[in-house]
Amino acid sequence: MKRDGWVPIRLVWNGCGVRDGEAFVDWCWLGGERFTDPFFDGTIEMAQRRPFNRLFTHRTRIAELGSWYVASPGMAPAGFIFHMSRCGSTLVSQMLAALPENVVISEAGPLDRLARAESIPEAARAEWLRWMVSALGQKRSGLETRYFIKFDSPTVLALPSIRRAFPSVPWIFLYRNPEEVLISHLREPAPAMSPGFVADFRAIDAPMDEVVSMRPEEYAARVIGRICECAAQGMDECGMLVNYTQLPEAVWGNIARRFGVGFSPDEIARMRTVALHDAKRPRQRFQADGESKRLEASDAARAALARWISPHFDELERFRNAAGIP
């Protein structure tokens, strides 16, 4: 079956392990629509409200994804974006998505869940990752020449596996003042920062009864710290660290150079316009909130970040400074 215009939106498998024929893909019709929402799921949610998708969204075996990979290889990724969370990664992806020449996949559920699926044997997971990345990287309008993927923050725990599957793809890790990140999650926790909400990874090596009884600031700080630790451990010649303070200029500067792309003055102007707005709420103007977050930090929050995040954040800063990246 031809898959032009169809997008894989969900991967389903036996969580205790995968045997031949036990993994399936759900497909949604997107036609030529581009991914311009802040997150992949936002685009798919709107598409699934259409009568056609209510009738024809369907499920196939994983082999169908492999057949589409052979029949219609998608664009090769120009760069992967990993991040600490609440640190400007959505701004970066939205700036890139403003250009019709770019395909930008931002936190696609099936891709992130697959990357973190330790129950799937390494060889099969690498192959399926290549299939999924290819399917999401199809040209839609025909104008596209560049392809970028932003992963969900905890997916950096799977960085070694992703690097083995895509050893030549350059990547960046975005991070920010840990006090500001932690307070953002205490105000409005992401699923990964709440015990039990994300079941396909374990960032904290502790018994579940201990995990569920942790104070919110400790749990979030330990998860954020582990994310930063994995980024530092995985840093290699293809990787680059980007501090939030370097945005938005880094997008057409250091990040573009790392990804081996160049932007015209007109493209930079369009990206600058995007940077004037809130990345997650594009209709609102951007309002800097770092100072208010730092003032809001409690003694308990500061103690948690000092213990669980600061050592790894400091290591990231040392790596970035040693690389001579302004």
Image (cartoon, rainbow, N blue to C red):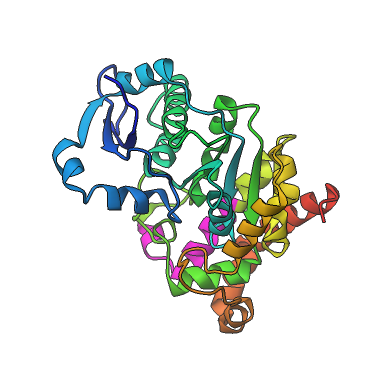
In which quadrant of the rendered image does the N terminus lie?
top left
Residue 132 at least partly seen: yes
Residue 249 or 236: which is nearer the viewer? 249
In which quadrant of the rendered image does the C terminus lie?
bottom right
Q: Which residues are magenta?
A: 209-227
Percent coordinates x, y for residue 238 in the rendering: 71, 35
Residue drawn at the location 72% of the way across and 52% of the way down:
265
In this image, 216 relative to 58: left or right? Answer: right
Residue drawn at the location 45% of the way across and 47% of the way down:
107
Asked whether residue 214 is drawn in magenta, I would say yes
Residue drawn at the location 58% of the way across and 50% of the way down:
96
In this image, 118 relative to 100: left or right? Answer: left
Above or below, 216 relative to 242: below
Residue 231 or 217: which is nearer the viewer? 231
In this image, 293 relative to 38: left or right? Answer: right
Above or below, 190 relative to 165: below
Percent coordinates x, y for residue 2 in the rendering: 30, 21
